[in-house]
Amino acid sequence: MKKFFCFSACLLSLFCIAGCYKFSTKTITKPVVTMNIALRGGTYANVVKKFLPEFERQNNVRCNILEFSEDDLHKKVAQNAEKEIGDYDFCMADSSWVAEYLEKGVLADMKAYGYDLDDDIIPATKSICYSGDGLYFAPFYGNVTVLLYNNLLVKEAGYDPDDIQSIEDILEICRFSKKRHNFGFMYRGDTENNIVVDFLPILRSCGGWVVDENNHPTVNTPEFKIAMEVYLELIDTGRAAKKDDVIAAIANKSGTMCVGWPGWYTPTRNSSMGYIALSGKYGRGSEAYNSNIYGIWTIGVPANSANKEYGVKLVEFLMNPKNQQKSVSKGGVPCRYSSLRDDPEILKNYPEYKLVCKALESGVYRPTMVHWNDFYTILGRRMKMIFDGERTIEAGLKEAQTELERRLGK
């Protein structure tokens, strides 16, 4: 019995020594920095968050995630730029904020820290990312308008999706649907921004745009008037609704098609809906214009961050081709050929990404101007008055042009 107790005591001592040794050799490395990450809440933030644990591990940092609504993110990042040392080390930015952020010096030049965009990124998506010799934005999430449609209603009108090659085709399908007691073209009429954005692909297809090369308003032009006439014909076949109601109407066959975004709906093999890139043509024999409107979310590093080198490392990490390919299964929409066109495995599971790639290739950013919010508010208000019959096309566009020139000081 004494031998047993003696053996037990020795064994316990060995365990204690081993445990102490194990504890004493375990090292706890403190993160070198804590980074504040300002993200647009929802799908965009979710994609970024999936990759942060691996980034933290590789770089021995801690990421403090801050999610905001679109408006709050816009305001907070802009206001934060007024501080000597900012609160954020990385942020997302809507492409419509580019002019304002550049004017205010909100973001750092990432080329100064050794990062640049590569040739795998779709060229047109990079057009607003540079200013002078500097790189201030990276195109992270490839939002772009597409034509969303109901498969059965398009077939009933005698079309296959590949046959929809012009605005005239869209109008013919929508007129047919209206005769069959369905709604044809659905559009969002709930905000000035949505009114303008849904119209822009039609405007581009008619050869018009909202500003000239000097950002001078061009809404009272022959091209704009033609586009408005065509758009009135389109919306006469359908009705205005909020986004969710538009999607529901097209899904249940009460509506035929609309201008939408890939994130609204993911087609499957037995889907009632699908989408295509708009061709940019008014008629089949017409010139093709870049008509798919970008809503790309970019990423960058605040210029007053105390941790800019780590912010740039995070941009480079998230924009890495391999990581962007991985992001597809997590809800990401990269602006890369390797993710949208060249990976057979991705296309097997997400065949619609070929269409997204085509839309991004033939896309265009909204005007790079500081007062874009004021611009679309003024234009959208006048367009709604035209839709409601309160103004003729001529009168409404003339008033919009005058008001825009006054507001923009042109």
Image: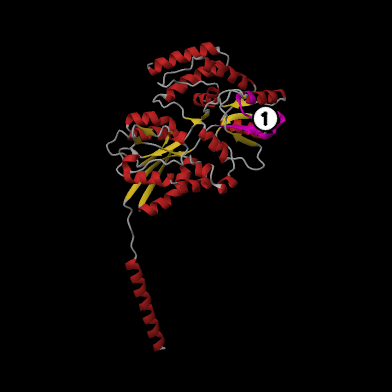
**Residue for point 34% across, 75% down:** 17
* Disc 1 element: loop
Image side of residue 197 versus residue 21, left or right: right
**Residue for point 71% across, 23% down:** 179
Residue 139 drawn at (x, y percent)? 44, 38
Q: Give the range drawn in magenta.
A: 146-169
Residue 299 drawn at (x, y percent)? 41, 39
**Residue at the spot of label 1:** 254
List the single residue furthest toward the left: 84
- Front position in the image: 119 or 106: 119
Residue 121, compared with residue 326, is above or below; it is above
- Front position in the image: 342 or 110: 342
Q: Does the magenta stretch include residue 158?
A: yes
Image side of residue 254 versus residue 223, left or right: right
Q: Does the magenta stretch include residue 144?
A: no
Residue 192, compared with residue 19, is above or below; it is above
- Front position in the image: 18 or 338: 338
For the question of whether residue 183 can be seen, the reply is no
Residue 252, compared with residue 47, is above or below; it is above
